């Protein structure tokens, strides 16, 4: 319904495909503003004897979002809540290490036109008002989230999977280095070069969640 109040909501999931929801948190008060950061990385390339340098495109970094969430336990402007419990509920949904994945959950942010698949990068909590016994009555959560899109979906969104670009990939269950090299270059034999580029002593010992870089490699000519 138009004009209906919708609270900013954070959902948590076990896996990056967002098929197994494990928790949810809705803010007490919607933020009055939020930050959205775009960052493009370039590499400087200069020739010998040159005083200047050209900027070679490297990658577009994941978008970042920053929010300030207010938690109030005085009951002045909303239903009275336990500030300490609300903060703990926020941290449980966004940062708790899951027993079966051994990592914090993947998150989804929902608010109006903003829908983001992301992870929590940081949360700074400031308590500003207290009861006589020291228990908090008001807090502000400054939270930073980073976009975290599953590789296949990101590749589809970018519309390219060129072997002439540097790619970053997170090792998933069942991945092998030859298989990952095949996805990027169309040729599994590049796995040794990828292993060397990433400083891997044993290419067979990949760990789930490990970040690997796949550099631009000259493809073999086919006859």
Image: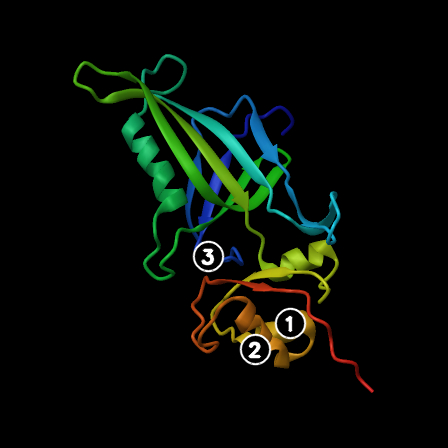
Q: In this figure, which residue is indicated by the disc labeled 2?
A: 192
Query: Extreme front residue here?
Result: 49
Q: In this figure, which residue is indicated by the disc labeled 3?
A: 20
Mark with earlier residue (3, 2): 3
Q: Quadrant of the N terminus?
A: top right
> At 47% across and 58% down in the image, what residue appears?
15
> At 64% across and 58% down in the image, what residue appears?
153
Image spot of residue 187 (x, y percent): 67, 79
Image spot of residue 77 (x, y percent): 41, 14
Q: Quadrant of residue 5?
A: top right
Question: Position of 42 compared to 176: left or right?
Answer: right
- Of badges 2 and 1, nearer the viewer stands 2
Question: Position of 13 compared to 36: left or right?
Answer: left
Relative to 218, residue 53 above or below: above
- Of badges 1 and 3, nearer the viewer stands 1
Image spot of residue 43 (x, y percent): 67, 50
């Amino acid at each position: 319904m138009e004009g209906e109040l919708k609270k900013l909501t954070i959902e948590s999931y076990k896996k990056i495909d967002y098929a197994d929801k494990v928790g949810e948190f809705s803010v007490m008060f919607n933020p009055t503003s939020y930050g959205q950061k775009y960052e493009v990385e370039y590499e400087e390339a200069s020739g010998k004897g040159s005083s200047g340098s050209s900027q070679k495109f490297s990658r577009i970094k994941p978008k970042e979002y920053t929010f300030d969430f207010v938690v109030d336990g005085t009951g002045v402007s909303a239903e009275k809540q336990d500030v300490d419990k609300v903060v703990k509920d926020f941290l449980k949904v966004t940062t708790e290490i899951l027993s079966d994945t051994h990592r914090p959950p993947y998150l989804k942010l929902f608010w109006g036109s903003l829908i983001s698949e992301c992870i929590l990068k940081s949360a700074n909590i400031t308590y500003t008002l207290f009861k006589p016994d020291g228990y908090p009555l008001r807090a502000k959560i400054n939270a930073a989230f980073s976009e975290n899109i599953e590789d296949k979906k990101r590749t589809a969104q970018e519309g390219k999977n060129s072997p002439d670009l540097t790619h970053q990939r997170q090792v998933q269950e069942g991945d092998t280095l030859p298989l990952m090299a095949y996805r990027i270059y169309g040729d599994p034999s590049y796995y040794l070069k990828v292993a060397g580029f990433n400083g891997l002593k044993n290419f067979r010992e990949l760990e789930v969640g490990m970040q690997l870089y796949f550099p631009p490699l000259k493809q073999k000519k086919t006859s």
